[in-house]
Image: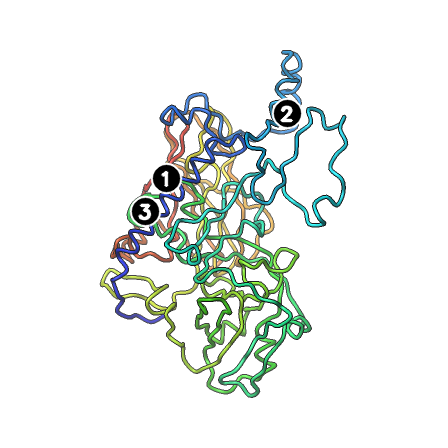
Amino acid sequence: MTIFEPDHDHDTKSKLKIASLVEAEEAFLAKARISANSVYFSPNVGSAGSAKGIEHLQRPQGRRHFLASVAALAGSGVAGMALAQTTPPSPENKAPAGAVWRPVPEDATKTQGVAIGEDGGYGTRSQFETEVRWRFTTKTPFSSWSMTPLEHGVGIITPSGLHFERDHGGIATIDPATHKLFVHGMVKQPKKFSMSDVKRFPSISRIHFIECSGNGLTEWSKPTLKTVQGTHGLVSTSEWTGVPLSIILNEVGVRTGAKWLLVEGGDASVMTRSIPLEKAMKDCFLAYGQNGEAIRPEQGYPLRLIVPGYEGNTHIKWVRRIELADMPFMTREETSKYTDLLPNGKAVQFSMIMEAKSVITRPSGEMVLPGRGFYEITGMAWSGRGRIKRVDVSTDGGRTWKPAQLQDPILPVCQTRFRYPWVWNGKEAILQSRCVDETGYVQPTLGQLIDIRGLNGPIGSVYHLNAIQSWKVDTEGRVSNVHYY
């Protein structure tokens, strides 16, 4: 890491960005609150947010509970009506993104289903699944980011279509048949590789998270966004497949003295970052696959650099050039951007490792508990330095902690799902999670981070906020984002 004097001219722009994010989240919630399939659904949306009668967050129910419920309904003579009401037609007969709207029969066993192949040979998701990424409004839609709906996640893999994205010059459209990767600089033999060349090398598959270093940037000085999608949605996990970068570098031959490499994207912004050669040779790889298929255009089709554990902007998309040198290249993205501001006004460069972090995704902001009783608290934990070793959960604002169950698989540099059984007594509660990775690093409180990094600038230190998140549950079961440390 190095330290330099930053430019503070971006303060006004940062304030505008936060206002835009708040506006985008409110627009998203306005739609979600009138969607019966959303965890934020609110039948009383027009009554100033009253929680009475709202059943947003269903308690986990097993098959026994389900059968008992059906029997009870049958006995009451309203079962038919209740089941029919589980599939209401869309007011606009409009399916959500990625789905096709189809009429819903009252009894699917009495009606022929959809013909095989009607989807054109590439499937769709259910018309009843509505989760989507949302982005904040910028002057141009070509430089922005979109957030993963973590509150809807199951397991650890993010659906490819819901993986967060950060683009600086729009989503590039590149023909793999003509795409080339040029490797040069301090090498013995500069070479160009076609995609066919790249795919001829031995490949690997790894499940890794990618997190934008700006994940949570709105939350340094005060709780700002309301949902976990807004506060933590710039992290996602995929299975990536590709070629170890060490194979490509050995193919061109690294000259003595080379210590860094510049990786350049083929998009309109020509995004670049400097990567230490030691890291490149250790575990970086060039991915052309994501979750069992070709990597998506918004994720860098046809070729993306994966830098396990490093901040998202180093995972250069649409890779077209790699140059080796004996020092970092000091590009725009590692001087005026993506640095960590300190209390003395200076900033740290090349702090690229994403430290251990966790968050409770259910229950989380804007959800409502329908009543006292049992709930399963669940969430995700991850570390750029290896595996998650332990996650503790507190329901009293950090005064006491209990170990959560970690769900397999527990992989290095990968999100790990945790679960914790909780009986809510109807009183006010502060829910928190705190993770420890295999190096022994303990996720800090926000106060501990601020003691080190300060709150310079309009929104604090901006990047690398990995503090413990607090969700407040009030006596009516409403969950909200709070600072509590």
Separation (CA) of disc 2 from disc 1: 32 Å
Residue depicted at x 37% and y 29%: 474
What label does residue 66 carry, if any? 2
SS under mark 2: helix
Provide the residue designation for mark 3.
19
- Image quadrant where one finds the C terminus: top left
Q: Earlier in the sequence, mark 3 or mark 2?
A: 3
Provide the residue designation for mark 1.
481
**Where on the picture, by quarter, is residue 351?**
bottom left
Residue 471 coordinates in the image, percent (x, y): 39, 38
Residue 150 coordinates in the image, percent (x, y): 50, 45
SS under mark 3: helix
- Closer-to-camera residue (360/80): 80
- Closer-to-camera residue (290/392): 290
Relative to 287, is 231 on the left or the right?
A: left
Q: Amino acid at mark 2?
A: Phe
Position above or below: 238 against 468: below
